Image: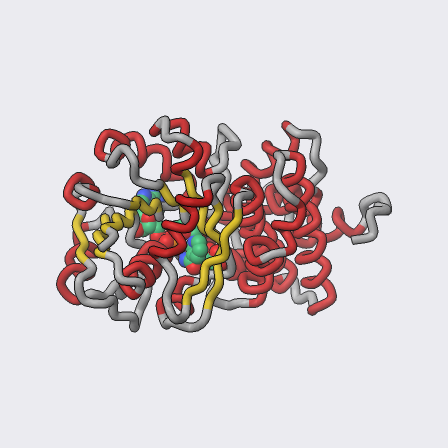
């Protein structure tokens, strides 16, 4: 039986632990907070992050990372993007030397512009073949309710990719394989920024035309950045790109979408963040923009989201700025 350690017991870490257990893995979850670990371990529920969901028997949880990681065949990283490095520095000496390291986070690190697998590689020194990104239209609550969902398992090494896909294939959760780690990670990170933008449009009271324009132009700029970083443009038309935008930009379950609506209604970013769980796009917007600037890539939508999030521009001003840009000729 594959022994898997999931580091992070938020909505997605917990839902993914459920998938792994359904797929027949022996699952050990690390939670940051004692109350969450105890509830998961004793009642097999996580009422803060996944209300109404019961995990399969056999899933264990602890706040002791060393105990969670002992003997792991596979390690899943499920903490928010901006917290990954600080946690990994502590976990690195505890990681089994050959286990694949799977990143679930959708974000780019502030200050470095690093993708999540780049952070993992820098901190752990793990070979590229051990690094895996899982990303797609995977709203945690729907996955945990065992509603049909598909995802992308991205790894430069086929054998590792298949091993991770085997560990998380169930009757309702279906992974597709890709070797385009860069594309899958960029698509996931920029998706959160676009979901904020769609929410902002909604909060401003705009209709479906505006939202469709934001999604489509957001996807175009996501693909532009990805290709500049070496990704394949096809990745952005797939599950990790268009697929995740469809799910997140339409769903009230998306925290980025909800945060965007609040920003569009004129609420401040502190109020918006204080009210809910992690909305990765809020902090990734500036990081994505920095990465784009370093490669000479234009990302006008991301630029406006970063302005709104920083409080330098109102949502209405951002919309006006986008509408008054010089005409472009790419036609997509
Ligand atoms: N929730 C979802 O539907 C999905 C989330 N993701 C991605 O997975 C990653 C994790 O998201 P969730 O599990 O949903 O987040 P969450 O907000 O539900 O939970 C985050 C988890 O990380 C822990 N944590 C550790 N250090 C933290 C810190 N410094 N600040 C805040 N939390 C910290 C929290 O205690 C919690 O266990 C994010 O990058 C997100 O974009 C990806 C797909 C689906
Ligand atoms: O990434 C997600 C679904 O694929 C979840 O989105 P939120 O982080 O906005 O809730």
Is 265 displayed left or right of 87 in the figure? right
Question: In this rendering, is residue 307 above or below 198?
Answer: above
Which residue corresponds to the image point at 28% horizontal and 31% vertical from the top-left? 92
- From the viewer's side, name the closer residue of 280 and 102: 102
Res. 75 image quadrant: top left
Which residue corresponds to the image point at 40% horizontal and 66% vertical from the top-left? 143
Q: How is the image coloured?
A: secondary structure
Which residue corresponds to the image point at 30% horizontal and 49% vertical from the top-left? 8
Res. 275 image quadrant: bottom left
Residue 20 at what x, y percent from top left? 31, 59
Question: In this rendering, is residue 82 above or below 121?
Answer: below
- From the viewer's side, name the closer residue of 236 and 84: 236
Res. 23 image quadrant: bottom left
Residue 211 at what x, y percent from top left? 68, 63
Question: In this rendering, is residue 224 above or below 216?
Answer: above
Which residue corresponds to the image point at 59% horizontal and 54% vertical from the top-left? 241
Residue 192 in view (yes/no)? yes
Is 34 displayed left or right of 78 in the figure? left
Residue 305 at what x, y percent from top left? 62, 47
Residue 58 at what x, y percent from top left? 17, 62
- From the viewer's side, name the closer residue of 223 and 285: 223
Residue 271 in view (yes/no)? no
Residue occupying the far front of the picture: 159
Q: Quadrant of the N terminus?
A: bottom left
Is 58 displayed left or right of 326 in the figure? left
Numbered disc total: 0
Question: In this rendering, is residue 221 above or below 229?
Answer: below
């Amino acid at each position: 039986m594959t022994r898997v350690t999931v580091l992070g017991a938020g909505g997605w870490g917990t839902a993914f632990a459920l998938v792994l257990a359904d797929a027949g893995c022996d699952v050990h979850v690390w939670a940051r907070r004692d109350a969450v670990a105890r509830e998961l371990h004793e009642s097999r529920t996580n009422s803060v992050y996944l209300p109404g969901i019961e995990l399969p028997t056999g899933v264990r949880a602890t706040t002791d990372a060393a105990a969670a990681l002992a003997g792991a065949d596979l390690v899943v990283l499920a903490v928010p993007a901006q917290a990954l490095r600080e946690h990994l520095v502590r976990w690195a000496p505890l990681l089994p030397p050959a286990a694949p390291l799977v990143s679930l986070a959708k974000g780019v690190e502030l200050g470095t512009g690093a993708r999540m697998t780049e952070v993992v590689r820098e901190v752990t020194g793990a070979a590229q073949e051990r690094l895996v990104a899982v990303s797609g239209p995977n709203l945690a609550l729907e996955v945990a309710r065992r509603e049909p969902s598909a995802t992308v398992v991205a790894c430069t090494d086929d054998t590792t990719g298949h091993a991770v896909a085997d560990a998380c294939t169930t009757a309702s959760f279906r992974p597709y394989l890709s070797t385009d780690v860069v594309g899958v990670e960029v698509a996931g990170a920029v998706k959160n920024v676009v979901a904020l933008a769609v929410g902002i449009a909604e909060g401003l009271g705009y209709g479906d035309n505006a939202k469709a324009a934001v999604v489509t132009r957001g996807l175009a700029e996501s693909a532009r950045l990805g290709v500049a970083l070496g990704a394949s443009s096809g990745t952005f038309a797939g599950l990790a790109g268009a697929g995740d935008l469809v799910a997140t930009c339409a769903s009230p379950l998306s925290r980025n979408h909800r945060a965007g609506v609040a920003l569009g209604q004129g609420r401040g970013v502190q109020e918006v963040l204080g009210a809910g769980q992690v909305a990765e796009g809020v902090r990734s917007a500036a990081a994505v923009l920095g990465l784009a600037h370093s490669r000479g890539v234009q990302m006008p939508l991301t630029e406006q989201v970063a302005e709104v999030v920083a409080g330098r521009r109102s949502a209405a001003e951002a919309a006006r700025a986008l509408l008054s840009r010089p005409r472009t000729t790419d036609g997509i």
